[in-house]
Amino acid sequence: MTKFKTFALGMLTAAAAQPVLATDLEVTHWWTSGAEAAAIRVISEGFQKSGNTWVDGAIAGAGGVARPLITSRITGGDPMGATQFTHGQAMRELIEAGFMRDVTEVAEAQGWKDQIFPQSLLDSCTFEGKLYCVPSNIHSQQWLWLNNAVFTDNGLSVPQNWDEFVAAAPKLREMDIIPLAQGQQSWQKQLMFNVLMVSIGGPELFERVYAGRDADYAAGSDVAKVFKAAAEARDLMEGSNVQAWNEAANLMISGRAAGQIMGDWVQGEFTQAGMTAGEDFSCLPGLGVNEYITAAGDAFYFPKVDDPEIIAAQDVLAGVIVSPETQVEFTKAKGALPVRRDVELRDPTPCMEKGMAILKEGHIVESINTMVSPDTVGRVTDLMIEFFADPSFSPETAQAEFAEIIATAD
Amino acid sequence: MSQSGKPTGLFKNLSAKIAAVPMVLTALVVFVGCSVWTIVYSFTNSRLLPSTKWVGLDQYERLWGTRRWLISIENLAIYGILMLILALVLGFLLAALIDQKIRFEDGFRTIFLYPYALSFIVTGLVWQWLLNPEFGIQHAVRSLGFETFTFDPLYNTNTVLYGVLIAGLWHTSGLVMCLMLAGLRGIDEDVWKATKIDGIPAWKTYLLVVIPMMRPVFITTLVLITSAIIKLYDLVIAQTGGGPGLASEVPAKFVFDMMFVSQNLAQGFAASSMMLVAVIVVIIPWAYLEFGGKKHG
């Protein structure tokens, strides 16, 4: 319904205020959950202040649904004014084929180079020396979220790392509690595995496998530990029969599950349910083992258009997204981290502070999406869906197949 | 043009031919043209955008080495065979029952046909809820007091296809029933009278006399059901998303995911070309029997 409201609001303002300079800019995105919709409203309001009109193009469903729609609109010759997209190679081909507009001039005029942090955000937007996207926020995936009450009520102490969590699981099972909540959607399985890669295996392992494409190493004993942990996670997740990530979060909120491995965007769900970070729920970045996070995130891209008015509006939007005012409010609403170093978080939760501290230390790993092609991500995902669904799928077999994928990755 | 001379073969029924031109063009350009384009590009290494770098049969080799594709085919085969048999049997039974000059026939017909008016997405969502153990049929029966009742086909690798099948049958059998009913009504009353006089039991009349007479209806129905089976996609998306694991993956979903999610167009083209081949393998013998047979008979 929020989608409808924002849309209706957009249409209303479009009808009511028609100043001379107003340009309609359609912005597509897939931010439709409660916290996400509140966040996108921050940007749209900031943008409307410039006198232009924001036409909301929310696409229901996760990125997996929205991305194909967005790319086919761009390649099909019906580009929107601007669109949210995730960093990575997915956009690369569109840029190479000349469908996207670069915003280098705006970036230089506003001195983004000195403000945007970490630098890797701009790097992943850059192609042949030109900047093609505007990073809006940072999201990290490597978090284990725990419902404190579930542990303390059952006479357990709240785990401080993955091993303690695994050790607490049998007791939780006795109380008929699912230790680890997880939705069945395919991207969540992929996320789970790659979080284990970073957190259990460590950042060097993660980058050596995906960026270095070292297939022998991927078949070796270091990666075997990750697969062993994945098999443990599979046992812990048994009984978590929900589809979407926020339904899984609900299992944890209601106390039917004890924990969840999910990106930091899930925090918004917890706080919306009235839980307080640190008191009602805890967060363990890097699963409490290797405190490294992926500093990838969302970004806005601008398709190439001819209309000079739309181009001007695109530039305005680019400026609005990275402006400090938007960053403070936007990241607050979305539960994400800001892309600027000069922004102070407004009453950050202990979890956001942890994330910010890790970022400042530079404990950052590249995202899988920037290291390998969507095709390779798809193959890893397919393997993981099968592995996590079938308890008889041995970690050894899965690892051998994984190494094969890495050997032919691109 | 003068119509006085005897029209040659080409100009016979000229207006009908002119009227057919747009459809012929659409068929040639859209169906044939795009199919050929798809097949050609399945031999390239196209990713997000079509490219013309030829890689020979690599895409097909990879396709047939992908377990997900093999599972998809197997799933479609199981679903297809069961669907075909059960939809025909159920549809015919319903039609035969309704044909017994029952009261409220119109009402029953509407009720049975109604599911067909819903899209597969809606059907899928409704059945996803019904089959969800937390608030569906299992929950309802348990709250009646049967605490150990378990019915969650969609959450079990071995039964998920049957969960999809239930929804598919619910959706399709009404239409099959209507077609069959029309067929039954087309049978001359005299046939029934004759068999009654000869003392042939009703079930035997249906099996040995009526069904053979309804051959055209059966063939139409068969084509409709088969095409619905091959394009099976939305039902799976709404009900299971292909899960648990890969247990309810189907070829059409494989094609979509390859083309748009993995951004590997050529791999998706290769898979859809294989689907086309499968359709042709089914259609050619049928067309031969149907149209080739007519000339002789």
Image (cartoon, coloured by chain):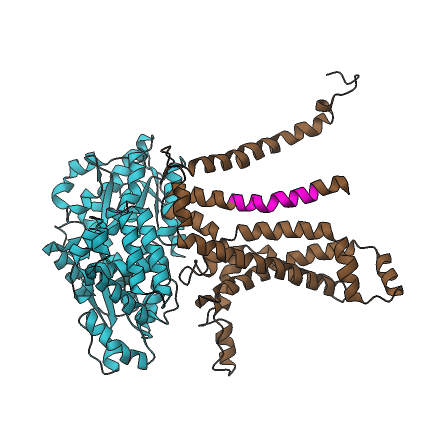
Q: Which residues are magenta?
A: B276-291
Q: Extreme right residue here?
A: B197
Question: In the image, is residue A248 above or below residue B4?
Answer: below
Tell me if residue B140 can be seen: yes
Q: Is residue B156 magenta?
A: no
Question: Residue B176: horizontal and vertical position, in percent?
Answer: 66, 56
Q: Look at the magenta stretch and give its main secondary structure.
A: helix
State left or right for residue A139 relative to residue A63.
left
Q: Nearer the viewer, residue A214 or A168?
A: A214
Q: Colour of chain B?
A: brown
Quadrant in which the C terminus of chain A appears: top left
Find the residue positioned furthest to the left: A361
User: Measuring 21% from the left and 48% from the top, which residue is drawn there?
Assistant: A211
Query: A143 and B226: which one is in front?
Result: B226
| Residue B12 picture location, percent across and down | 74, 25
The quadrant where residue A236 appears: bottom left
The quarter of the displayed image where residue A89 is located? top left
- Does B277 lie within the magenta span? yes
Q: In the rendered image, which quarter is residue A329 located in?
A: bottom left
- x and y, in percent, of residue A392 in the image: 36, 68
Query: Viewed as shown, does residue B53 lie left or right of A165?
Result: right
Q: Please give left or right for residue A310 compared with residue B111 in the image.
A: left
Relative horizontal placement of residue A399, taking residue B79 as reference (left or right): left
**Residue B57, relative to residue B192: is it above or below?**
above
- In the image, the chain rendered in cyan is A
